Every structure is written in structure tokens, then in C-alpha cells.
Amino acid sequence: MRQNELSENTHKGFAHSPRVYGLERAIVIELCGEIDLVAYQRLAPLVDAVAAGPEPIVVVDLSEVEFFDCSGISLLMRAHRKVSDRGGLLRVVCAEPLTLRMLRLTHLSAHLSPAPTVGAALLTS
């Protein structure tokens, strides 16, 4: 599936749709708004499609996320598992202290190497 199909067709109806784009040797998913159970159910097909793609690095950008609960953690774990199973790397962009704390408490920060910017996330790869 092409990137424009992923970002335009998968999630019609979102107030703020996720954006998917390629950058260097990576694909980036920009999420925004609230990542809760409802968002998880809508985002999972997009995340699965991107995670199954050929890019060696998948970056999930949480910079514009206003709320992130255990559903968001589940979404990241799901993406990490799918990307890892094919030999790729998943990185997360996040500077929000509460979200970073959740990543540390769940030990995901050790696997996802959170970075403050997309550029920094690509440098840790």
C-alpha cells in the first residue's frame, strides 16, 4: 500500500488524521490528539500496515499527542513486535514527561529509544 493511501484512506473520520511519510530510510507515523481505546481501535490497522512495510526503521511521532494511556502503550508494543519480527527498528518521538514516564515504567523506553525529534530518533537507529 502506498504512503498516501495509508494516511488518506485508512482513517477517514478522525478530527486530526495521522500523517504517514517517508524520510531517509524510515517511515514516520505522526499521531496527534488523544491515544485512548477508541483511537487504538482506529489506528491499529494503519500501524499494522506501516509496521509490515519494507522500511528498516519505523518512527512513531507522539509530539502532537495530548493524551496517552495504556491503549497507547499497547499500540506501541504491537508495533514494536511487528517491526522486530521482520528485523526492523521502531523508534518513538516524545518529549512529554508523563508519556516518557509511562514508557520507562513499562520498560519500553529501553526498546524504543525515545527521542525529542524525528531527526534525533533517526540518529539513535
Image (tube, rainbow, N blue to C red):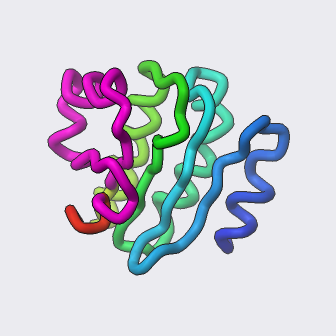
| Residue under the image location 42 percent in, 20 percent down | 70
Indicate left or right for 82 with 105 as reference. right
- Residue 7 in percent (x, y) is at 70, 58
- Residue 45 in percent (x, y) is at 62, 47
Is 100 or 51 nearer to us in this picture?
100
Residue 15: which quarter of the image? Answer: top right
- Residue 26 in percent (x, y) is at 42, 71
- Residue 81 in percent (x, y) is at 33, 48
Asked if the magenta segment contains residue 97, the reply would be: yes
- In the image, residue 72 sits, relative to residue 69, either above or below, namely below
- In the image, residue 61 sits, relative to residue 106, either above or below, namely below
| Residue under the image location 35 percent in, 65 percent down | 119
| Residue under the image location 35 percent in, 72 percent down | 56
Asked if the magenta segment contains residue 21, the reply would be: no
Q: Please give the range of residues in magenta.
A: 91-120
**Quadrant of image for the C terminus:** bottom left
